[in-house]
Image (cartoon, grey):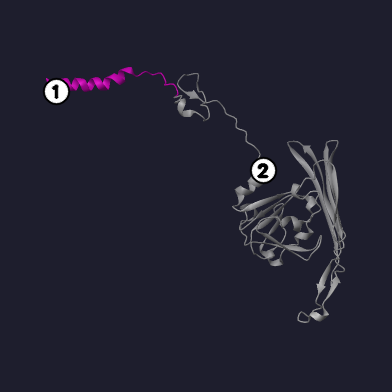
Amino acid sequence: MDVVLRLLLLLGLFAAPASGQTDEPLPPDEGDEAGHAGLIEPIPLEPDSTGTRYVAPVQYVTGERIDPSRVLDRQANMGSVLDSREWTGQGLDAAEVLGRAAGLSISSTGGLGAAASLSLRGSSSAQVPIYLDGVLVNRPDAGGANVGAVNLQSLERIEVYRGSAPMTLGGVSMGGAVHLHSGTGGGPLAGSVTARSYGGLVFEGGGQGEAGPWTMSLRARALRADNDWEFQDDRGTIYNPNDDAVATRINNDVRGGGGIAMARRDLGPGELALSAVADFSEHGLPG
């Protein structure tokens, strides 16, 4: 009798949930409201026409545009961005702007527009590849590039990678990499004149306008300098101070300039862009 009673109790325990089951679908779990404090609100689900499934509505997610510095951080561990706002209207040359980047050293023959080479973290200039819009400018077997000849007016930003280059630039580099990005020449009409020491003058200007369906833009730069500073001349006899004298640097002048012109218009689903870049320079050869 005791065994039969125990069997009946066990059957009752298993039969109770089974008798309460129905074919109706269970509603979605809305969760504990207190546990979701400060989190994203749950998305309400609606049953479909059959009433057996719940369908989530379409969700649209719109993100913010990533600025150039954040793009660079995703490409390499160590890097920095120099934006055109850091040199526009200041009368600087590329060597002076690049010298602001951490870990980068500039060697220059001296003066505005003079030849200059760079190194990253003690590397030689030949070990630092320089790219212009993704195209390699200097080959490792051809030595370093002259960054003093770079026209800043045609650039939008400069990316400096220390230690390693991103995969988009080949990924293989002994001394990092420098990536120059051309600009569109857009922006309001503006210009500046900067006077510098030793006869230096820098003219910068540009702007943007509309011509029918075309958007026309131009940015230009011109410079001149005498670079005739005084220096201590030992006349090649470093151990004889009696013939030392103060001399003036001669035949060290520079003339140069350049710019970028661009025309853009909508063409079907895309855009048609035409651009022209020009640069020229003339340097003296100091003795």
Magenta region's main secondary structure?
A: helix
| Region of the chain picked out in magenta, as a range | 1-28
Residue 17: within the magenta? yes
Q: Residues within 10 Å of mark 2 (few under 14, many from 20)?
A: few
Q: Residue at x 64, y 58 (%)?
A: 176
Q: Amino acid at mark 1?
A: Val
Question: Looking at the image, which is closer to me, 98 or 279?
Answer: 98
Which residue in the protein does label 1 denote?
A: 3
Figure quadrant of the N terminus: top left
Please tell me whether mark 1 sits on a helix, a strand or a loop: helix
Q: Residue at x 83, y 38 (%)?
A: 214
Residue 218: within the magenta? no
- Expressed as whole percent of the image width and height from the top left, the position of residue 108 reads 76, 64
Residue 193, placed above or below residue 139: above
Please tell me whether mark 2 sits on a helix, a strand or a loop: loop
Q: Residue at x 16, y 20 (%)?
A: 5
Query: Quick one: label 1 or label 2, which is nearer the N terminus?
Result: 1
Which residue in the protein does label 2 denote?
A: 67
Figure quadrant of the C terminus: bottom right
- Expressed as whole percent of the image width and height from the top left, the position of residue 23 reads 38, 19
Residue 174 in the figure: left or right of residue 113:
left
CA gap, disc 1 and disc 2: 78 Å
